[in-house]
Amino acid sequence: MAKISFITSDDRFYNVSRALSLMKTDIVSAISNAKNVVIKANCYCSSYQLSATHLDTLDALLDFISPHVKNQITLAESCALGTALEAFHNYKYFDIQEKYDLALVDLQKDQYQTATSNQDSSDKRKISLPKTLVESDFIISVTPPKTHGIYNYFGSISNLLPSHLDPTAQSHKSFVRSLRINKQSSIASASSTQHNNLISSLYQIMPASLSVVDGYATMQGNGPGSDGELAATHWAVVSTSAPLADLLSINLLEFELENVTYLAEILKEANLDNSIIVGDEWKKYITNIRKHPNFSNV
């Protein structure tokens, strides 16, 4: 039975900590056997907090999982605007590095290896991805929810793609070099549908084992970068099922599933039977955030 936790309050640390505690049995049983735990944070911009995973969110997460993890935990990300080193400094990730014995990895400087999606033979995708993520046996995706000019909604699944490879990133050349839809067509000329299909393929290759969608401060409007604006939503969603975490999040932010193509595609293969939401009553906290100016029905 799949479970999702939802907590809301005016305390970000509490929201994440409490949402995790409601999932303790599910999380501990899985993470205690993991050999290579990687936290995939989000730092689209190196100097705009609203675009990035908050320190309090990471602190609450690490406080919860550290007693149950045998080996060193890795925190990994890159930036679309700025560098990972700048982001780790500006968002004070170094402040918790020693506390939790964290390894910090800049995914833009990581070794890359080619992985193939598990789609049928007529539509397999080869994707060059950071070794740190591909070799992890327990990826934790932790991100604020944001609007996005191509995906419409950005959440725990789309966060699996390093920020410097985001199709809206300035480092678009590296994105073109690293990712291919097929032998003839590069991502540079890809349609919105193809970009969404790529995220679906990415999730097949390296699904998140745990998702933390920190909706304390949601980005609305012209996301996912420095032009996005605050929607003070004050909640957290946690699940060992990333599709379910994102599904609840889009409902909280009044996105229709049909407008989040990659999530709709992934959910076709997900088992939603007997899934339950624990914690606070989420329907009281639905917010119709302002969508991206390029919001589409693709």
Image (cartoon, grey):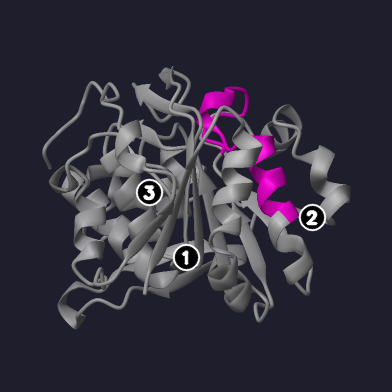
Disc 3 from disc 2: Cα separation = 31 Å
Q: Give amino acid for label 3.
A: Val
Q: Residues within 10 Å of mark 1 (few under 14, many from 20)?
A: many
Type of amino acid at the residue the image marks with label 1: Thr
Residue 98 vs 48, above or below: the answer is: below
**Mark 3 to mark 1 CA distance (whole Å):** 31 Å
Residue sticking out furthest to the right = 98
* Vertical relation: 139 (above or below) 174: below
Residue 48 percent coordinates (x, y): 57, 22
The numbered mark at residue 176 is: 3
Left or right, residue 51 beside residue 122: right
Work out whether residue 261 or residue 209 is closer to the camera in this orientation and state it: 209
Residue displayed at 64% across by 57% down:
110
Any part of residue 83 in sight: yes
Mark found first going from the N terminus, 3 or 1? 3
- Is 101 included in the stretch rendered in magenta? no
Amino acid at circle 2: Leu
Quadrant location of residue 275? Answer: bottom left
Q: Which residues are magenta?
A: 43-63
